[in-house]
Structure formats: C-alpha cells, structure tokens
Image: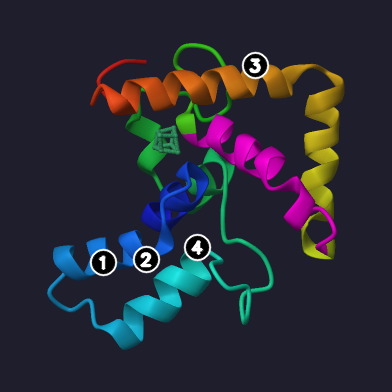
C-alpha cells in the first residue's frame, strides 16, 4: 500500500510501476500485481476501485509504527521536516480535482482541500512538492529534511 500510495501521489506511470514490481519480487505474477498495482494501488482504470487508495501520513501513522522513528513529522504539511506524504497527498487531490471532486467518497477530503485553499496553504503545499521533486531529481529525497 505504501509503495503504490507513494507512486500514485508522485504521478508514476502505472505500467512502469507494475514492471518495477515484476522486476523486484520473484512472486510478482501478472494476475496478482496487475489488478492490485494498476487498479487498486493506482486507480488506473477506476473499474472496480471506487476511489484512489491514497493517503497522507495520518493513515500511515495510524496503521503502522513507521512514523515513530522517522525524521519527518507526520503532523506537518509544509516546511522543513514536514512529512512528504502530506504535501504530496494534498497536491494530488488539488491536481486531480476535476476528475475526483464529483466522487461522493471524496467529498470529505475535498472539504479539507477547500479549507486549505481558503487559508492559502495549497500554494505552500505546491512549493513543498516542487522542493521534493527537485530533491528527487538530485537523488536526495531522503537525505535532507
Ligand atoms: S512521517 Fe516518515 S514514516 Fe511517517 S508517513 Fe511520513 S515519511 Fe513515512
């Protein structure tokens, strides 16, 4: 879930992620990975998944103990040290608003997007994502805060 979540938020091409799973795991058979990675993980066709299976740090923190020892702060969206999943998550929703806002299962989340837009946080989130993408292209996504 975490890998597909990150890939979806980042905007990875679904077929490329599927190929990555095939190259990485010896038991990554097509009949397993293709529906799980392409459809459930990345919402690539929207046929049997009713909404994108994406999350911010909030869900990852609730469902795991990863955040306990992480150098990023799961409670912050922006600024140095803010968890990258948060900015990527809100940016994903804002970028795909035309497609997703009408989905009734996304209504609550788009209420939060509206609040962030009203408070001016969306532009800070976009800046944070731009910084993350710059760092990723330099191969330094995890080496800095
Ligand atoms: S705080 Fe760290 S472990 Fe938690 S979701 Fe963010 S990057 Fe992952």
* Image depth: mark 1 or mark 3 in front: 1
The image shows residue 66 at horizontal and vertical percentages of 37, 41
Magenta residues (range): 85-103
Question: Is residue 50 found left or right of 59 in the rendered image?
Answer: right
On the image, the x and y values in percent for residue 103 come to: 81, 63
Q: Which mark is residue 31?
A: none
Under 8 Å from ligand 1: the CB of mark 3?
no
Q: Name the residue under label 2.
A: 15
As drawn, the label of residue 124 is: 3
Q: Is residue 113 above or below residue 35?
A: above
| Residue at horizontal 38 percent and vertical 78 percent from the top | 34
Where is ligand 1, by quadrant? top left
Say whether marks 1 and 2 touch (CB < 8 Å): yes
Is residue 20 or residue 110 the one in the foreground? 20
Look at the picture and state if 48 lies above or below 142. below
- Residue 141 is left or right of residue 127, and the answer is left
The one nearer the camera, 59 or 28, is 28
- Mark 1 neighbour class, 10 Å CA radius: few under 14, some 14 to 19, many 20 or more: some
| Alpha carbons under labels 4 and 2: distance apart | 10 Å
Q: How far apart are marks 1 and 3 (CA)?
A: 34 Å
Q: Quadrant of residue 102?
A: bottom right
Q: What element carries label 4?
A: loop
What distance separates the C-alpha of mark 4 from that of mark 3?
25 Å
- Chief SS of the magenta region: helix
In the image, residue 51 lies in the stretch drawn in magenta:
no
Identify the mark nearer the N-term, 4 or 3: 4
Label 2: state its secondary structure: helix
Q: Name the residue under label 4.
A: 42
* Position of residue 37 in the picture relative to residue 99 (left or right): left
């Amino acid at each position: 879930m975490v890998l597909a979540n990150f890939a979806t938020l980042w905007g990875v091409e679904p077929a490329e992620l599927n190929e990555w799973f095939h190259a990485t795991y010896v038991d990554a058979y097509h009949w397993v990975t293709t529906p799980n990675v392409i459809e459930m993980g990345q919402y690539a066709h929207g046929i049997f998944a009713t909404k994108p299976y994406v999350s911010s740090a909030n869900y990852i923190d609730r469902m795991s103990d990863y955040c306990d020892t992480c150098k990023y702060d799961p409670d912050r969206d922006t600024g140095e040290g803010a968890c990258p999943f948060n900015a990527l998550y809100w940016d994903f929703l804002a970028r795909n608003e035309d497609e997703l806002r009408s989905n009734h299962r996304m209504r609550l989340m788009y209420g939060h997007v509206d609040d962030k837009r009203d408070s001016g946080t969306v532009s800070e989130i976009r800046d944070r994502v731009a910084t993350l993408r710059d760092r990723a292209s330099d191969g330094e996504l995890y080496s800095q805060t």
